[in-house]
Image: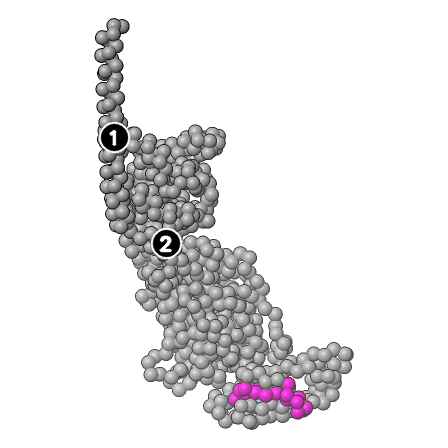
Amino acid sequence: MSDGAASVKQEASGLWTRRLTLAGFSLFVMACAGLIQLNSTLIGIAATLPPTPDVATLPVSAAVSDRNGQLLRPFTTADGRWRLPVERSGVDPRFLDMLIAYEDRNFVSHDGIAWSSMARAAGQFVGAGGRVVSGGSTLTMQVARLIEGQPTRNLWGKLRQMVHAHRLENELSKDQIIDLYLTLAPYGGNIEGVRAASLAYFGKEPARLTTAEAALLVALPQSPEARRPDRDPLAAQRSRDMVLDRLVAMGALPAEEAMAAKHEPVPTVRREFPMLAAHMAQQAVKAQPEARQVELTIDKRLQEALERLAAGRARILDPKVSVAIVAADIQTGEVLASVGSAGLFATQSAGFVDMTTAIRSPGSTLKPLIYGLAFELGLAHPQSLIEDRPTAFGAYVPVNFDGFSRGTVSIHDALTESLNIPAVVVLDAVGPARLVSRLRRAHADPRLPVNTAPSLAVGLGGVGITLRDLVSVYAAIGNGGKPITLQDGIKPQANLTLAAPVLDPVAAWYVSDILADVPPPLNGSPGRIAYKTGTSYGYRDAWAIGFDGKTVIGVWVGRPDGAPVPGLSGIVGAAPILFEAFDRLGNRKAPLPRAPDGVIFASNTELPSPLRRFRHPDEDLVARVSAPEIAFPGDGVDVDLGLSAGSISPLMVKVRNGVPPFTYFANGAPIGRPEFARQSSWKPDGPGYVTLSVVDASGRGDTVTVFLN
């Protein structure tokens, strides 16, 4: 090369050096100016960002769950979205691992922005002529976009998203950010959040997902409308398989597991959300409008089984007939199932009406309480004889359901055969007002006609009452006479511990023992449960309520509009449903309780003379005039307690008439003061004569002397 050529080359090189230096300096100056301007812009963006949400207060669908936390019925948000409350602890760890590996592998370590991903996205942006090819967004940036609800397919939106993500990282933990993503991620239509998506597409909670299900839930939020499996199953499958392939390439998933997952079909329909205990769930949300999660006492498995039972039986009976069922725990009063109708959307049978709380005529279902009062008052024993003959009470002339009279029957048979005339005779003795009072002790709310006093018609259904009320009454009978407050979780219930029982334990057991002998329907076995049926006037309501040792169940069948259903009766329409309901209790089945102390096991001829035949004292005299009288043991009798053989059995003292509470004495020493019970037990030291006394609340008394051996 000549010297001239070398000189020219050297000069050109220097020129390029000066130009590059000048360009670099210019870029530096422009960068400084840009940074100054950018800083001002970032401050402006930060000032317009929405407040950082707290996942605990984020607007979500109200979710009503059962006693074990299982979802019964969710409700949409105010804007019509399915966005169920969810936390990472309720999501399959497999899904979380796949989500982070696929979307943001450096999620744990970055501060909201993955600069390497942003650089890649910027290069693709330049190469595509200013079109966004990939976002380079972290999970935190995606959460920022979801919070704002604005698209970020432009540089300004991306910059705003980055500023927002940086703030989220400063104000929230990584777990809180993930929880926000799990709650807000879009899955097509009005479905938001992984829990709603899992329920809509797989029909299950996201706590347990297959590999294929988890991969689909990872893929859908990237393009939720285009990949919706209910609209384009092939697009959904391709996106799912793309996620699986990428996870395999990253070493985050074994190839054979991914291959097996690809063979699993994608869902092709969107499932309905659960709608169990629909009426009760609606009441619960209405009672607690701000609650995100409401837990009821309902048992989901039993609720589901009884809803199927009600719907199936209603279809067989009549399209316009509805069925309501309430099941409760006898000891706690917790409602285990509440079926308000044969189907919420059953239009012909007005399925939207909750018939568990509808006021209807109870038919014969109050008869057990009537006889229980007679037992408690010392007026009768189950083997006492009573007349079933045409009887008039002024203008009121009751007749039996079949129109026939049986003559002389035992009270046991009068109740098992549900005879009307003996029930009214006994009610006339114990008093309709006392019956209504005992219903209220059981936390029932009987409705009488306005400005009327309780009459004898109450005993045969002349009063308004709900299915829940009757379940409460029968729960008290099954619980030894102690009242139970039904608890359902809708709102806190006061623990009403009344001093006054519904019945005393012996009277309650007598009633239970008789009801266990009521002939079962064709699908039932005798003795399994204590139960009673009822049919209201005009075949408008059919009832069956029963209990075993742990559970009480009530069934109502009829038309919600109150129209008659010819041929409908408790034994035909409701009793078979009751027995099938008990079949569905599973391991809750329990035998009826054993007899308490004081029960008299005797035939009619073995009973004390006053109890062999039902006596009808005047109620006013019993309540206000008559002094207490020791009905058992009788004065001057010998009572065999087995004392001469060395055993010590308790002596039961029973009282009729008088005004409780009573104080009992043996040889002048008090032996107890039951506040309302008309009986008391006492264990003597040995055989011999003993003087027994009783004094009522008015200071009146009675005394007998007996010989114990």
Residue furthest right as drawn: 645
Q: Quadrant of the C terminus?
A: bottom right
User: Going by the picture, which residue comes out furthest to the top?
Assistant: 2
Closer-to-camera residue (429/30): 30
Tag shown at residue 25? 1
In front here: 82 or 512? 82
Q: Position of residue 336 (x, y in %)?
A: 47, 61
Q: Examine the rendered structure and indicate whether residue 506 appears above or below residue 284.
A: below
Q: Residue at x 26, y 33 (%)?
A: 28
* Gap between marks 1 and 2 measured at Cα: 47 Å
> Please, what secondary structure does the residue beneath circle 2 have?
loop
The local crowd at label 2, few if under 14, some if 14 to 19, many if 20 or more residues have their Cα within 10 Å, is: few
* Residue 514 sits above or below residue 92 on the image: below
- Under mark 1, the amino acid is Phe
Q: Residue at x 53, y 90 (%)?
A: 697
Q: Quadrant of residue 462?
A: bottom left
State the image quarter where residue 690 is shown. Answer: bottom right
Residue at image coords 26%, 28%: 24
Q: Quadrant of the N terminus?
A: top left
Choose between 303 and 526: the one closer to the eye. 303
Say whether disc 1 or disc 2 marks the residue closer to the N-terminus: 1
Which residues lie in the magenta part?
654-671
Residue 14 at least partly seen: yes
Q: Looking at numbered disc 2 in the image, what kind of residue is underneath it?
A: Asp
Q: Where does the image place residue 64, in percent across and percent down from the top left?
A: 40, 57
Asked whether 405 falls inside the magenta stretch, the response is no
Residue 326 location, x and y as percent?
44, 64
Q: According to the image, label 2 marks what residue?
A: 54
**Quick one: label 1, few (<14), some, or many (20+) residues within 10 Å?**
few
Residue 302 placement (x, y as % from top left):
47, 57
